[in-house]
Amino acid sequence: MKTLLRDGGGIPNTLLYTLAIIAGISVANLYYNQPLLEMLRQDLHASTMEANHIALYTQIGYALGLLFIIPLADLFSRKRIILANFSVLVVSLLAIATAGNIYTVHVFSLLTGICSVIPQIFIPLTAQYSLPENKNRNVGIVLSGLLTGILASRVVSGAVGEWLGWREMYYIASGLMIVSAGIVLRILPPSRPNFQGTYGALMRSIFTLIRQYPALRIYAVRAAFAFGSFMCFWASLAFKMAEPPFYAGSNIVGMLGLCGVAGTLTASLVGAYIQRVGVRRFNFIGAILQIIAWLLFLFGANHYATLIAGIMIIDIGMQCIQLSNQATMFDLNPSASNRINTIFMTTYFIGGSLGTFLSGAAWSLWGWEGVVAAGILLSAGSLTVTACTKK
């Protein structure tokens, strides 16, 4: 594609949908491990907490990548940054596939998380170059691609893990990164940097933005609590499903991820209604839906029907919160879109890391009831932030 992006000129639909697809393929690297945790634990002779830390280190890595890599997109060529990340991902995913112990998986899960931040370069790019009347819709499309990747990753990895083995899933993921790099090299047009100066000055400007925009702090913190609640569920689901009465393997855990299609569909709709419904109202709705989902997980923990209903509800609640905050925040300072997204998403994945850690600790100490308590606490944190602010 030879069409160049220009401010005010819009973003071609072909490029938009391609970015959405690659966003989904890239973000999937973070979530392949979730249905496979019990399988990894058994194969590598690890404890439940050590297996849980695979997901934890991936989330921490993503937060680090958001903080230190995404701001570079305001300073250097986005295409070069993306291709460098894809190259490292090929190596790190192959290292996981050939790992002989849990600690090797931990190290390269961290590296995989760091370099899987590619969708968070696409989202600010989409917001910056979309026509104003199409911005929320276009961001919603890319986010829908990202969410579809999360959804599909669990289903695919669960099935591949059951039929071929967990290592084969990571070999396949490495191949997908090679294909994605080739597509990006071909279709992503050049774009103008948004910042003039050094990397140090760029990073200092992030803290300036944090101080300058209180609304950004609110958007980021309440979304982080909500994402922590969301990850709290998925980080322990494989352990729960391996026990009675389910005795389920990775394929069943992955199939449960299909219920998240409700969240994907929600994302495509929320963007169009943000102005009408309001960001604050969407956040109330999202947090309350998450708490309802956790009550279903508590009182219907041994029934597929209530688990499925809860997964659908917690996904819808999560997307109400994420998209309403993320699509709105770019209006604060469009010329600093990558750095604003860095602040939001770094905070967001710190919340996810907290939820993953609390989930593993709660499961080890108190079982499923402890996981539910941790999830409700995090959702309540998001609700409290919204209730105590006017944004």
Image (tube, grey):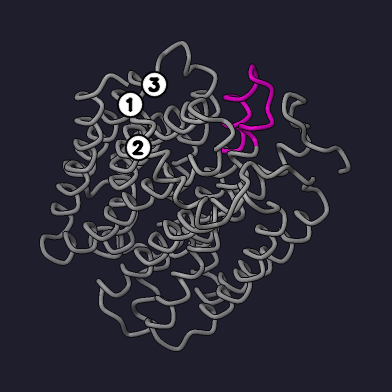
Q: Residues within 10 Å of mark 2 (few under 14, many from 20)?
A: few
The CA distance from mark 3 to mark 2 is: 21 Å
Residue at x-position 48% and y-position 84% = 99
Identify the mark at residue 99; answer none if there is no mark: none
Residue at 79% over, 45% down: 189
Residue 217 percent across, percent down from the top left: 33, 36
The one of 208 and 149 positioned closer to us in this rendering: 208
Which is more N-terminal, label 2 or label 1?
A: 2
Q: Quadrant of residue 105?
A: bottom left
Q: Quadrant of residue 103?
A: bottom left
Residue bearing mark 3: 279
Residue located at (34% from left, 51% from top): 352
Q: Is residue 91 left or right of residue 234?
A: right
What's the amino acid at mark 2?
Answer: Arg
Name the residue that disc number 1 marks. Answer: 283
Q: Nearer the viewer, residue 160 or 207?
A: 207
Q: Is residue 217 above or below residue 272?
A: below
